[in-house]
Amino acid sequence: MSRPTTSIPLPSDTKVLYIGLRPSTLDYSRMPEGLDEAVLTARLEAGNTALREAGFDVVWCPVEPSPDQAEETVREHLREHRFGLAVIGGGVRLFPEYTPLFERLVNVLTEAVPGIRLGFNTDPGNTVDVLRRWTGTP
């Protein structure tokens, strides 16, 4: 396990909002060969299963690429639950055309939930590692 992200780890029962682009909205012609909607959806499902099996309380929040639509979706989730950590998936962060979306999400989260922590994965399969970094859980 890597070193905790913070000197004061979050409780292991922290509710986590996991934000990622809805797989049906992506342009797979720009993705590595073999990655399509079905493969990504399966990877997301496997990653979410691993999170639950590891005991984390995670709410999946698939968003549209439109910053306005994504903001509304995130705000709906924030009205329904109290989150201590938000994980923003790599698809939102790694493509330049989604930079305005990424900025909007960060600002909505930090304005709506003062003190929320932000974590970042690089693949659905390593989201569990992000949560372990934040909670100090092995």
Image (cartoon, helix red, strand yellow):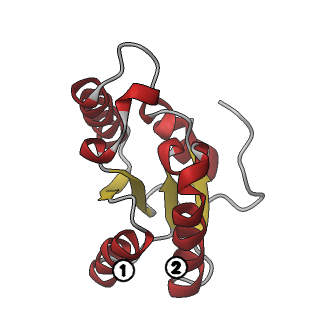
**Dot 1: within a 10 Å radius of its alpha carbon, few (fewer than 14), some, or many (20 or more) residues?**
some
Looking at marks 2 and 1 on the same chain, the residue that comes earlier in the sequence is marked by: 1
Residue at screen point 34% across, 56% down: 57
Q: Could you say which disc has been placed on residue 90 in the image? A: none
Residue at screen point 33% across, 78% down: 72
Q: Which residue is under mark 1?
A: 75
The one of 45 and 67 positioned closer to us in this rendering: 67
The one of 19 and 95 positioned closer to us in this rendering: 95
Residue 77 on image: x %, y %: 31, 74
Please give the count of numbered marks on the rendered protein: 2
Mark 1: secondary structure: helix
Residue 6 on image: x %, y %: 74, 57
Spatial CA distance of label 2 from label 1 is 8 Å
Residue at screen point 41% across, 56% down: 19
Q: Please, is residue 126 above or below residue 77 in the view?
A: above
Are the residues at dot 2 and dot 1 in contact (C-beta closer than 8 Å)?
yes
The one of 22 and 57 positioned closer to us in this rendering: 22
Looking at the image, the residue that sits furthest to the right is 7
Residue 31 on image: x %, y %: 45, 26
Q: Could you say which disc has been placed on residue 108 in the image? A: 2
Quarter the C terminus occupies:
top right
